[in-house]
Image (cartoon, coloured by chain):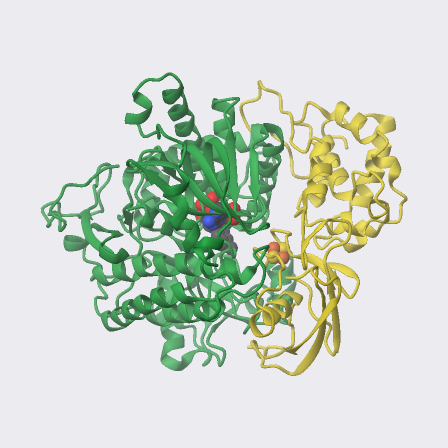
Chain colours: A green, B yellow
Amino acid sequence: MKPSDLPGPETIQTDVAIVGSGGAGLMCALHLAERTPGSDVTVVSKGIVGKSGCTRMVQGGFNAVLDPSDSIEGHFADTLAGGYWLNDQDLAWALVNDAPKVIVELETRVGCFFDRTPDGRIHQKAFAGQTFDRTVHRGDLTGLEIMGRLRDQMFRIGVRELEDVRALDLVVEEGEVSGIAALDIRSGRPLLIGAKVVVMATGGAATMYSLATPAREKTGDGIAMCYRAGLELRDMEMLQFHPTGLLAGDSRLTGALLEEGLRGAGALLVNALGERFMVRYDPERMERSTRDVVSRASYTEIAAGRGTPAGGVLIDIASVLGTEEVRRRFPGMVDRTRQLGQDLSTGPVEVSPVAHFQMGGVVTDVDCRTELPGLLVAGEDSGGMHGANRLGGNGVAESTVFGARAGDTASEMLSGISTGTSKGASRGASTKGRPSIAAARGFFAKAFRALGADEGEHPMALSKELKELMWRRAGVVRDRANLVEALDALEDLSERCTRTRAPGPPQLNPTWQEAIDLENQVTAARCLVASALEREESRGAHYRSDFPETDNARWLRSVRVRAGEGGRPQIRTVPVELSRLAPPGHDATGDSGDSGGQARTSP
Amino acid sequence: MRSRTRPVGARAVGSLEVLVRRSESGKDDRFVVESHPGMKVLDVLVAIQRDHDPSLAFRYSCRVAMCGTCALRANGTSVLACQSSVPSGAKELRLAPLAGLPVLRDLVVDPAPFFARWAAVTPYPVPDAAVSAPAVVRPDSPERRTIDPALDCITCGICYSSCSVSDEGRDFLGPAALNRAMVLIADSRDTMRTERLARIGRLDGIDRCHYIGACSACCPKRIDPFDAIRRLRRWRVTGPPAAGAT
Ligand SMILES: Cc1cc2nc3c(=O)[nH]c(=O)nc-3n(C[C@H](O)[C@H](O)[C@H](O)COP(=O)(O)OP(=O)(O)OC[C@H]3O[C@@H](n4cnc5c(N)ncnc54)[C@H](O)[C@@H]3O)c2cc1C
Ligand code: FES
């Protein structure tokens, strides 16, 4: 659409605009409404409120220290060891301390009911990488219980719900966020939302790979918006691959997960030659090894030609437990394989590593504040909490804990503004909250460009190209040559994305939405690849075949990326602050200089 | 090692004629897509969008039966598009939006009326403010045995849309909302159980149900709202179940 034909935006004024209605978004709304009753809260959601995003899809569960014989320190140490010591230790400390409080809040105030032990107490199960059984769950549909109940709380607190509305960009004026430029997907009309505080909680960008687990809305919108607004991202090379995603050819079911509990229960992984290949990668833990190791092993087998014709390996639990037991213990997983004409309870099923979770994200402090006044970031959009690898069960814990914290912080920021103290501004609230149309016009023009364009490429074809590129060149196993090629190809793609075409009307036009998604995905992908190129070692989810060792002496550093000239990623690295705990045997005399020549700019 | 039933990702084996209800014309558009074994209705829609009409509107998010946003009618039956296979050997598939909800575009409906009724039963618990620790409730207690099988509703709207009473446009809370009310009334942690029972006894409540049972027959999560309504009718006489004695 030509800029001259662009309809003027409808405007909405609110105190706090929360972008995203997953665990982080809705916990934020709940805490805000309780701390500051009467505040005007708007939830902006690209999909249906509470029914989009990945929190709803959580199967396994939620890590929290509840048992008196467990300890906060234990959960903390497991989280750092699992993250290969790249974690922001303050964030991880906040998580382990708040997680039990959030479980109690979900149970006693929100209405959740988690599975019980026979004597009626909350049951906690074993998850990989943890020294204590601390994963709270509700069957294998934990996310449904949490999101269903949180969604119902919205009826109680009465927030403004903008459903099927997507944020396009942050409007920043005089160094502060004044609101967001948005698009009403239903009507196809631009929307300008003025807000004193914006909370970004759009849930990351793991869908940029051809094999991926997350919900379809998660196209890196939050990451890309923050990047364009000049914020610094960290650890973007850390993208978790889950080892057991289903393969179903062209079907959308490809990438659906088989849960980690299968490996916990003794499932075998075999290649097309019938070999239990884990013996070559982790003879001690075998299939029970961590996600990163198992994913890499499967990937290596497949790449070496020992995979199945469709490019997978086989998971076999039926021959270990027997049909009856598999059906009894994993009914949901059996159903899922039957959907594909296979049956986990009678034979092996084909699986592959799949892109699952983005550990990297926007740099924040423990209260979700960022370097940009007025902007908070929570959930998967934020970075640092999980370091180089996320433990199963720490994801939903992160989104609800930091969603709640964002709500508390936003509430504090609002009271700073209303009491007229300068505290509000100095502590990060925007004093404006009224964006000017002029400041947002460029964002709308960019978003509307593809709609009805006379010519251009099909966004869906480009998106397929992006996903295949990322899978091939920046996936489970990486090296310099492939990453350099990927970066070049992404530069080309990012140019081609500005020349896509979306035929059809403005209302609920999926191809138009995909054109906008694509630009964000490519932006996040460039940050990922540039960061992966920088990290010349292997750690957690990031594996470089040209630098296969973990190098603590040089690389206990976090890779930071920010938009440089022409929007290109500009990199620096910052030493990890081992403020509470250091890895065993760590020599503190290693290089700790700062490649960017500046001290850590804490937000 | 046992052999698998079929190769995964099998190539196309046939062609399928698909008729899709379009909102702009009010008519069906006809497409021919290549079909493969195990193909889901959602795959059919994606194929149409990719190969024929990029502007076709439909909704989905999770693709694993958890979000409940992909519901539509396939050959007249309300199903989740992501879970429902194209019957093997089928030559024709007719797709239309879910009944009983306003169509926004093509196969996308507005769930607002469904959620308005859901909200009408006060779907959140009202806990005792003094309680500060998770309740001790045995998993084999009558209370949990009543609630657990009724809990995993994904609010897809299929029961609402398949219910002949809701469908007639008469004011009826509908099966999903009543099932939720049952879950809360059975929950000993809630302090508003008596008020809830009164609410669902009003004109638009349980007495509107004609005992046809379409809701339970069509639920993709195998929940039994019909049974929930029966319990509610019983509790209206007996009062809400005592804790642990549902
Ligand atoms: C299949 C699966 C299983 C998982 N299992 C577990 C588990 O067992 N345990 C665990 O701890 N973690 C698990 N995780 C990870 C966990 O889901 C995430 O860590 C967490 O839920 C992320 O929460 P969030 O609130 O940040 O984002 P999400 O819950 O993903 O929500 C994102 C929201 O943002 C909205 N949105 C996106 N873009 C825009 C935009 N531009 N404008 C407006 N809104 C937008 C979406 O519509 C959605 O509402 C799993 C993830 C997946 C995919
Ligand atoms: S896409 Fe979520 S239920 Fe079908």
- Residue visible at 21% across and 43% down? A582
Using the image, determine if residue A462 lies above or below residue B3. above
Q: Residue furthest bottom?
A: B13
User: x and y percent of residue A255 in the render?
Assistant: 51, 64
Using the image, determine if residue A536 lies above or below residue A347. above
Would residue A97 appear left or right of A325 to someone viewing this image?
left
Instruction: From the viewer's side, name the closer residue of A213 and A338.
Output: A213
User: x and y percent of residue A561 in the render?
Assistant: 25, 52
Q: Quadrant of the C terminus of chain A?
A: top left
Would residue B221 appear left or right of A117 to someone viewing this image?
right
Instruction: From the viewer's side, name the closer residue of A458 and A426.
Output: A458
- Residue visible at 28% across and 36% down? A175
Would residue A533 appear left or right of A436 to someone viewing this image?
left
The reply to whether residue A71 is in sight is no
Q: How many labels, in total?
A: 0
Q: Quadrant of ligand 2?
A: bottom right
Which of the 4 quarters of the picture holds residue A206? bottom left
Q: Residue furthest front?
A: A4
Which of the 4 quarters of the picture holds residue A376? top left
User: x and y percent of residue A339 in the render?
Assistant: 64, 66
Which of the 4 quarters of the picture holds residue B243? top right
- Residue visible at 30% across and 37% down? A372
Would residue A590 appear left or right of B209 to someone viewing this image?
left
The reply to whether residue B52 is in sight is yes
Instruction: From the viewer's side, name the closer residue of A119 and A410.
Output: A410
User: x and y percent of residue A265 in the render?
Assistant: 51, 58
